[in-house]
């Protein structure tokens, strides 16, 4: 099946050529929150900072890679990172977890069904022919459907969206969805890796398409989109 999986030539986590500036993305701001993100690592994975404008308390969604780059983003906003949230445990989404855990002391939150993948990060590296990585630090808390994560005056709600991986989850807050590798602009998550299940993924996508059409989707790879746009134009829904 078709999936969004970046195939651009890369060097030190950057796209080579005219798209080198894609590493830094323009922040999205409202009166209550700020969303900033960096596109990092050899798989061009998005790592998100979501911050309460009033209190500066924040979360990181997917500590993907290049911890120093993410550190600079955190510092630029004076953010007080309270949680490290994981949509899933593929190697391209957990590469900077140890660095950010040491930097912030924030607890790592993930779904329990992701633990086999989480603990197999070194084997995932072998699968893709990449240098070995250590297993990330032990998670501090398991989260599941309906759990609420409060930071500052913001609250993120957990939506279980398995299929790409067994314990994939998304985070919804204030009309913004952080969906990991479930739904992309014009595509959907791959299911040909260990733990993937196409039928389960399609059920998760059905759940997401029931969200309001104006919901903005911040995916694990690629640009921002919306539920309405994907319902209208995504050929895989």
Image (cartoon, rainbow, N blue to C red):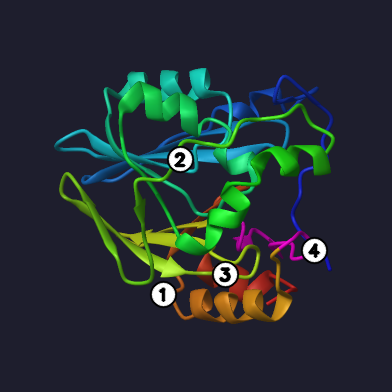
Say whether residue 214 is visible: no
Say whether residue 63 is visible: yes
Asked whether disc 1 touches disc 2, contact meaning CB atoms under 8 Å apart, the reply is no
Q: Earlier in the sequence, mark 1 or mark 2?
A: 2
Instruction: Please name the residue that numbered disc 3 is placed on.
Output: 162
Residue 120 location, x and y as percent?
A: 65, 46
Disc 4 is placed on an element classified as: loop
Instruction: Please name the residue that numbered disc 1 is placed on.
Output: 212
Q: Residue at position x 21%, y 33% from top?
A: 56
Quarter of the picture holding the N terminus: bottom right
Q: Earlier in the sequence, mark 2 or mark 3?
A: 2
- Graded by Cα atoms within 10 Å as few (under 14), some (14 to 19) or many (20 or more), the crowding at tag 4 reads few
Disc 3 is placed on an element classified as: loop
Which one is in front in this view, the residue at disc 4 or the one at disc 1?
4
In the image, 197 versus 155, the foreground residue is 197
Residue 73 marker: none
Check the image and report above or below for 162 versus 4. below
Instruction: Please name the residue that numbered disc 4 is placed on.
Output: 192
Check the image and report above or below for 116 versus 8. below
Check residue 191 for magenta coloring. Answer: yes
Check the image and report above or below for 71 versus 105. above
Q: CA distance from mark 3 to mark 1?
A: 20 Å
């Amino acid at each position: 099946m078709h999936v969004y999986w970046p195939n651009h030539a890369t060097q030190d986590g950057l796209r080579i050529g005219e798209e080198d500036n894609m590493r830094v993305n323009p922040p999205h701001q409202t009166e209550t929150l700020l969303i900033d993100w960096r596109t990092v690592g050899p798989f061009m994975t998005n790592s998100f900072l979501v911050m309460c404008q009033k209190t500066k308390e924040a979360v990181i969604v997917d500590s993907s890679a290049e911890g120093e780059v993410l550190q600079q983003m955190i510092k630029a906003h004076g953010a007080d990172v309270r949680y490290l949230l994981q949509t899933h445990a593929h190697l391209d989404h957990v590469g900077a977890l140890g660095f950010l855990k040491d930097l912030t002391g924030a607890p790592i939150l993930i779904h329990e069904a992701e633990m086999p993948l989480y603990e197999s990060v070194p084997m995932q590296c072998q699968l893709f022919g990449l240098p070995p990585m250590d297993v990330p630090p032990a998670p501090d808390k398991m989260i599941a459907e309906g759990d609420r994560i409060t930071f500052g005056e913001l609250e993120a709600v957990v939506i279980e969206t398995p299929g790409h991986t067994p314990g994939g989850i998304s985070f919804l807050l204030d009309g913004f969805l952080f969906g990991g590798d479930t739904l992309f602009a014009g595509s959907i998550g791959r299911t040909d890796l260990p733990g993937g299940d196409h039928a389960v993924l399609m059920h998760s996508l059905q759940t997401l398409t029931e969200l309001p059409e104006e919901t903005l989707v911040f995916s694990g790879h690629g640009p921002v989109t919306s539920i309405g746009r994907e319902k209208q134009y995504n050929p895989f829904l």
